[in-house]
């Protein structure tokens, strides 16, 4: 077997081992597809060279015979009077033309077709294409991007600019149309039409685009505009049957509207117009805090007053652990209520690469627990792939677990395994709680370790644009920074859930986001974080000079404050 075939087979096995579906949910695994495509292009070039060699042989044969036959027909009898010419004529017609026929009929594409057939079973499917298209629409809404910006590829932080063709814009519009999302259908069909008007060459014609565009606008209640576009379509194609029917229908509906306007008066007509305008915009969804969540993702609406900001500090922190006495870590207050702290330079590049190496072959589509059935299932609001790493698999994992325990003061023996996640195209996880609520009494019953008391989150990559961790309830936003980690408590000291910790992973606009997290549970924390009797238990914490902010560093102090955190403020 050819070396290139072996290489493609090996890539196929790797793809099969990881996942044959849901490629769009993990940028990390999508990188395998680039290498697959590179090998297929190399295989295609081999095929082209083979075809060119074959044609070159045929061309040389034709040129040789062209000269020979032109000479021969000028004096056929004289030419064949030479016995060698007569012999060679017999040989050519009996043997050589047959060989030429075999050469022409020889299929040079076998190797390429074989490679392509092997690979095709591991290609992204329709769900991947639709998923990637919906991701673009999600990014468009979340970051308030117009179609021209996306189509031209002018996104913040890009290093490999790419543009959308008319066919690409048309495809995005068609996918939105198939979901009855007429708002995005209009936007992308209009963009496709604009690029056609700018004389971009395309297999998609204006008539087809106008057909979709006029109908999507009609569905949003804009009859006049739909009628105008239908007339424009009929100017290009007078016999378009659907447009002819639509024209009559739109004119009839407009006549009814005008008559109703005359009868009902201006005020009621304005009310109807307001209702039509209300139909414009992205489709309604399940998320009540959508606007607040998306604002935070864009870096807007962060609610932190200057006074509260002045109480956030950076410090060297040892967690009261001997291991960090001589080499404390850098700790920064990200937010006050709920208390969110960030640890800088807390995971090294080599540790990150090892964790990614261990996780990547096992990445599977991330799931959520159905609050009614308790069954794990995929969801459109969580676009990522994840894998779980146990402490005994590799010393790096064990070392990270121990580091989390040392710095939080919490026992990680009852914690969940280290979860590694890689986000896909427009990867996100919409607002959610990490802890089980009162209406989910069996959320972690099978673990037998109680509720999730705290969350530790490693950021294992920088993200060029987007990808923030936001807390819509309190207006907080934490941005990814490679090598750092953030920590917060999900439960008050009383064991009650802290609903202000509802958080989300914003869609990744540009870049590749890798994170890993540790969910720490209640069991084992009885003496490390004693339970309080009321919901907002008052905790007394003694801070040493090592952990004190600069304004407190002159003497030991005892601080009394309402907090769900046992960490020194």
Image (cartoon, rainbow, N blue to C red):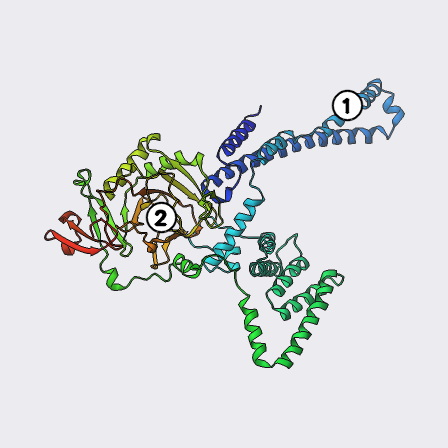
Q: Earlier in the sequence, mark 2 or mark 1?
A: 1
The residue located at (75%, 61%) in the rendering is 241
Q: Secondary structure at mark 2?
A: loop
Residue 80 percent coordinates (x, y):
86, 22
Question: Which of these two is toward me, 41 or 439?
Answer: 439
* Viewer-nearest of discs 2 and 1: 2
Furthest residue toward left: 555
Q: Is residue 445 left or right of residue 83?
A: left
Question: Which of these two is toward me, 155 or 484?
Answer: 484
The residue located at (29%, 40%) in the rendering is 523
Q: Is residue 240 visible?
A: no
Disc count in the image? 2
The residue located at (23%, 50%) in the rendering is 532
Q: According to the image, label 2 marks what residue?
A: 435
Residue 179 percent coordinates (x, y):
58, 54
Mark 1, residues whose alpha carbon is within 10 Å: few (<14), some, or many (≥20)?
Answer: some
Q: Is residue 314 visible?
A: yes
Residue 481 percent coordinates (x, y):
33, 48
Q: Quadrant of residue 236?
A: bottom right
Q: Quadrant of residue 188?
A: bottom right
Q: Residue 186 has which mark?
A: none
Q: CA distance from mark 2 to mark 1?
A: 81 Å
State the quadrant of the N terminus. Answer: top right
Q: According to the image, label 1 marks what residue?
A: 96
Mark 2, residues whose alpha carbon is within 10 Å: few (<14), some, or many (≥20)?
Answer: many
Q: Is residue 67 left or right of residue 554?
A: right
Q: Secondary structure at mark 1?
A: helix
Confirm or deny contact between disc 2 and disc 1 (CB under 8 A).
no
């Amino acid at each position: 077997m050819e070396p290139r075939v072996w290489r493609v087979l090996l890539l196929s096995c790797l793809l099969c081992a990881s996942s044959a579906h849901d490629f769009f949910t993990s940028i990390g695994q999508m990188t395998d597809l680039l290498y697959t495509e590179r090998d297929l292009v190399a295989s295609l070039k081999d095929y082209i060279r083979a075809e060119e060699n074959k044609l070159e042989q045929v061309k040389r044969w034709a040129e040789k015979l062209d000269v020979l036959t032109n000479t021969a027909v000028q004096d056929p009898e004289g030419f064949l009077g030479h016995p060698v010419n007569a012999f060679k004529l017999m040989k050519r017609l009996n043997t050589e033309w047959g060989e030429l026929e075999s050469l022409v009929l020889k299929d040079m594409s076998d190797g390429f077709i074989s490679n392509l057939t092997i690979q095709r079973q591991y290609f992204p499917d329709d769900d991947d294409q639709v998923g990637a298209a919906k991701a673009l629409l999600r990014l468009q809404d979340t970051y308030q991007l117009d179609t021209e910006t996306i189509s031209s590829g002018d996104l913040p932080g890009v290093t490999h600019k790419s543009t959308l063709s008319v066919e690409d814009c048309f495809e995005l519009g068609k996918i939105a149309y198939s979901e009855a999302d007429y708002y995005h259908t209009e936007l992308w069909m209009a963009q496709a039409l604009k690029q056609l008007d700018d004389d971009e060459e395309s297999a998609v014609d204006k008539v087809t685009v106008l057909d979709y565009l006029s109908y999507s606008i009609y569905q949003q209640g804009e009859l006049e505009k739909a009628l105008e576009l239908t007339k424009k379509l009929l100017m290009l194609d007078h016999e378009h049957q659907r447009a002819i029917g639509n024209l009559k229908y739109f004119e009839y509906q407009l006549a009814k509207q005008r008559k109703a306007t005359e009868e009902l008066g201006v005020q009621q007509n304005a009310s109807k117009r307001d209702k039509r305008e209300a139909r414009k915009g992205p489709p309604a969804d399940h998320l009540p805090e959508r606007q607040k969540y998306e604002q935070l993702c864009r870096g807007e609406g962060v609610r932190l007053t200057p006074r509260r900001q002045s109480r956030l500090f950076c410090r060297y922190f040892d967690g009261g652990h001997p291991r960090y006495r001589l080499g404390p870590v850098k700790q920064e207050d990200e937010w006050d209520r709920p208390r969110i702290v960030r640890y800088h330079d807390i995971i090294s590049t080599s540790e990150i690469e090892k964790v990614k190496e261990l996780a990547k072959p096992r990445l599977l589509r991330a799931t959520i627990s159905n609050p009614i059935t308790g069954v794990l299932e995929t969801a459109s609001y969580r676009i990522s792939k994840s894998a779980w790493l146990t402490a005994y698999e590799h010393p790096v994992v064990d070392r990270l677990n121990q580091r989390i325990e040392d710095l939080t003061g919490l026992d990680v023996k009852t914690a969940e395994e280290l979860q590694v996640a890689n986000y896909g195209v427009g990867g996100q996880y919409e607002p959610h709680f990490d802890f089980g609520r009162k209406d989910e009494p069996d959320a972690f019953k099978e673990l037998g370790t109680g509720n999730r008391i705290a969350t530790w989150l490693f950021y294992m990559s920088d993200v060029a644009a987007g990808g923030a961790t936001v807390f819509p309830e309190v207006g907080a936003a934490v941005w990814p920074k490679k090598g750092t980690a953030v920590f917060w408590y999900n439960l008050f000291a009383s064991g009650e859930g802290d609903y202000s910790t509802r958080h989300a992973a914003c869609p990744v606009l540009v870049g590749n986001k890798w994170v890993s997290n540790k969910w720490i549970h209640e069991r084992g924390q009885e003496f490390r974080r004693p339970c309080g009797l009321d919901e907002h238990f008052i905790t007394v914490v003694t801070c040493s000079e090592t952990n004190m902010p600069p304004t407190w560093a002159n003497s030991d102090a005892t601080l009394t404050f309402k907090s769900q955190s046992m960490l020194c403020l």
